[in-house]
Amino acid sequence: MSRARLAKYSLWQFRDFAIDRGIAIMIIGLLWGYTLIAPMRAAMGAAFNIGPSSPAWPIVVTVTSSVVSLSVLIALNGIVSTDRKMGYYRFLFSKPVSAVAYYSQVFFVYMAGVLAAMLVLSLVLHTVVPAFKIVNFLFYAAIIYIAMGGIGFFLSVATRFDWLTLAAVWLGSRVVRDFNGPKPGWSSKLVELLPPVHKLDEVSMSIITSGTAHTGDVVWLLGYGALFLALGLFLLHRGSLAD
Amino acid sequence: MDGLLATTDASYPAALVIEFRNVGKIYRSLLGNSVKAVEEFSLQVGQGEILGIAGPNGAGKTTLIAMMLGYLRPTTGTVEIAGMPARAYIERNGIGYLSELISINPKWKAETALVRYATLAGIPESQISAHVNSVIEKLGLTEHRDKKVKALSKGNLQRLGLAQALLRDEQILVLDEPTHGLDPVWTQRFRGIVEELRRPDRTILIASHNLDELQRLADRVAIIDHGRLQRVVTTGYDQTQQAVTRFRLTLASGHERIRESFPDAEEAGKGEYDVTVRNIQELNTALADLMSRGALIASVVPERSVLEQQFREAVGESQ
């Protein structure tokens, strides 16, 4: 009964995603893609034919993977914290609905929304760069949504400034890992606990190009995100919705 | 404290529905400061009862309700509904809740908001439209149904909040400052709506600053201050008999006879007099005497309601 209620409500959640976040993701994705691909096309003229062996291919992968990261950031922004900050939880959860089930569903509905947006953007890119494989790109987007989104979900439950915190954690991990390097000692062990952002370059290039990646890297990314998603749901179950 | 409780066993309805057991809530800041919002609060609410919760600003009413709804975890004690942890009960059955602050996404349209809440409440899809139309009509929101929430006035927003609480035939209703922002006409209508909602199998909690409203609607009123239950007042005839001592009389004629029946009557102007009596019997005897002397009485009004009197005593402002 409760599941059926929530399943029906998922249509409203998807609509919220489309209006509040989907449009923004599409506009940013199209603008970003256009401003980077158009100059290359203009410069190369008739020779414009980007493929995996082309020198421009890494740029395409970097741009598209950045669009995915940004989209996840937009999708996860305030996924839980907005309802708490604005007090919307009061009427929502006076109904026979579990907050854990509700927000789990929101997480996966938004994932469907992000993938739908990525599908449209990749279709557009595919018309300009036929070598760009839509399925590979969607596979990559799904992995990043779980990896980055899981952390974003946890932060949205734990803090009010989740967007800022997620961006800081994501970028901070990158900077710390780059500066720390592969040094021995306890500091390196601590760094290993940070989000596995260092694996993204390799994983994005590998998956977007060939649809495959090192299994260990993918499992590490997915596991890290899933763990934080579970922690977020646990915190939601044990904690208070009100301040 | 026990000596102050006005509740008797006879005033407890048969079946226990909501139970606060030694509930406490302490807010702690990151800097280590702490504020006790609620302390050792114990109270039972029965089936069919309308319980009022009164208290000054910051007394802990809203915190108490948030704990009852499972939105806040008590620091100590438990809140149970029908023998289950409060949150578990609500997740299974739902309740009708009107919060003090009406927080509905401002981008939603009034009718759409109700359809969403009806979906979450588990109203079958084929009946959602009928339920939504019914509450829209009942709360006078017909002309506002297509407006966005952000375009609604405070009073209309309050009515929308009440509408979502009444979407389903709930066994438990919790109304936090329900007439806040309503005009006098709708305040009056609201009272009628609550009276209609009274049912032997339904429990209603109303938190309000408006003591007159609680006096009229509630069977009992829990007065809280500084997070503690100060006393529980039963709002019936018996209490009136015991507690009200001062009345204002308005005479249409026979002003010169007033002190023959009420020797201590004080003139308050415009044909009105303040009189002090020990109890209702004394009041009635004196009124009968006054009328037998040819005076015409236009009205007799307690200077303060029982509840107001008790409230002032409970929060330490008795004059």
Image (cartoon, coloured by chain):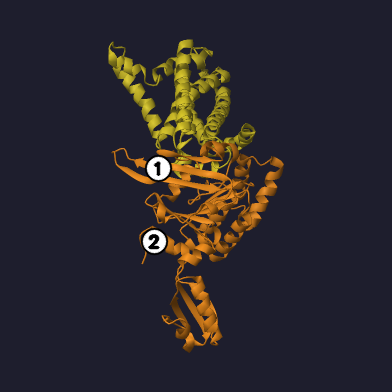
Residue B313 lies, with reference to residue B161, above or below; the image says below
Which of these two is toward me, B192 or B264?
A: B264
* Residue name at image x 70 percent, y 48 percent: B130
Q: Position of residue B223 (x, y in %)?
A: 44, 55
SS label for mark 1: strand
Judging by colour alone, the chain drawn in yellow in this rendered image is A
Which residue does the image show at 67% across and 51% down from the upper left? B133
Residue type indicated by callout 1: Gly
**Rendered location of residue B270, percent (x, y):** 46, 83
First in sequence: mark 2 vs mark 1? 1
Residue at 28% over, 14% down = A186
Mark 2 touching mark 1, by CB under 8 A? no
Chain coloured orange in the rendered structure: B
- Which of the numbered marks, if any, corresponds to residue B313? 2
Q: In this view, does A232 lie above or below B243?
A: above
Q: How many labels does the image show?
A: 2
The residue tagged with tag 2: helix, strand or loop? helix
Cα gap from disc 2 to disc 1, whole angstroms? 23 Å
The residue that mark 1 highlights is: B24
Disc 2 residue crowd, few under 14, some 14–19, many 20+, Cα 10 Å:
some
**Which quadrant is the C terminus of chain A positioned in?**
top left
